[in-house]
Image: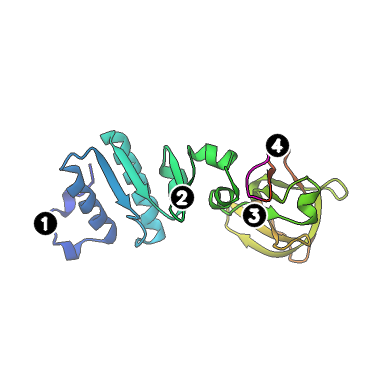
Amino acid sequence: ILNLTNYLDRRPGQLSGGQRQRVAIGRAIVREPAAFLFDEPLSNLDAALRVTMRQEITELHHNLKTTMIYVTHDQVEAMTMADKIVVLQAGRVEQVGSPLELYNEPANLFVAGFIGSPKMNFLTGAHAERHDCATLGIRPEHIDIVPEGTGMWTGQVIHAEDLGSDNFLFVDIGAAEPLVVRQPGKQAVTLGTHLTLAPRPGHMHRFDANDAPIR
């Protein structure tokens, strides 16, 4: 199951970090436990190995059909591996639900900012007051660049991150923080460019002064 057959003659010191993690999982499997408890098992691995191990642990979960409780600070791990997520803050349960439930309907400002990469944009002050809330939230992937005079915000591009498949634009619209806009990659945008932006209908999140959502 763990693809360790080719390494059975090696000593522990000759195993890679990922192989050692799989050995530890194997030691747990042979006990046939009612539940597996993982406490940030991938935190010390490099990025490429974390992706591989995420896939292997997820496949193991499906094969063994055993409950796995997985603690992580990495919301990407939580979103990609979990059937159900319990978001904790200072020992308090903030929300319980499926990854999509937490993504689409966060129970408060903390959950809204924790789920999603990059995190949700938050606007306060006049930007929020126009929508009768204390904080207005909109995810980077739910903001479109539109023709001048047709959008909700206008601003200047002050930073851009081109990741190949995605391009993240940081736009100064006069708020406390730049608005992060997610666009398909390979669309070159010059720093200083002025853009008009519009949120996609139905994707804005409103929060009151107590950080609770306004439905």
Mark 3 — residue? 186
In percent of the image, x 77 and y 45: which residue is there? 132
Q: Magenta stretch? A: 210-214
Instruction: Please tell me whether mark 2 or mark 1 is closer to you in this view.
Output: 2
Under circle 3, the secondary element is loop
How packed mark 3 is, by other alpha carbons closer than 10 Å (few <14, some 14-19, many 20 or more), is: few
Left or right: where does residue 104 sit relative to residue 38?
A: right
Of the residues shown, which amino acid type is indicated by label 4?
Answer: Gly
Q: CA distance from mark 4 to mark 1?
A: 58 Å
Under circle 1, the secondary element is loop
Of the residues shown, which amino acid type is indicated by label 2?
Answer: Arg
Q: CA distance from mark 3 to mark 2?
A: 42 Å
- What numbered label is drawn on residue 9? 1
Queried whether the magenta region covers residue 212, the answer comes back as yes
- What numbered label is drawn on residue 202? 4
How packed mark 4 is, by other alpha carbons closer than 10 Å (few <14, some 14-19, many 20 or more), is: few
Q: Is residue 171 above or below residue 115?
A: below
Instruction: Please tell me whether mark 3 or mark 2 is closer to you in this view.
Output: 2
The quadrant of the rendering that contains the N terminus is top left
- What numbered label is drawn on residue 92? 2
Q: CA distance from mark 3 to mark 4?
A: 28 Å
Q: CA distance from mark 3 to mark 1?
A: 47 Å
Q: CA distance from mark 2 to mark 1?
A: 46 Å
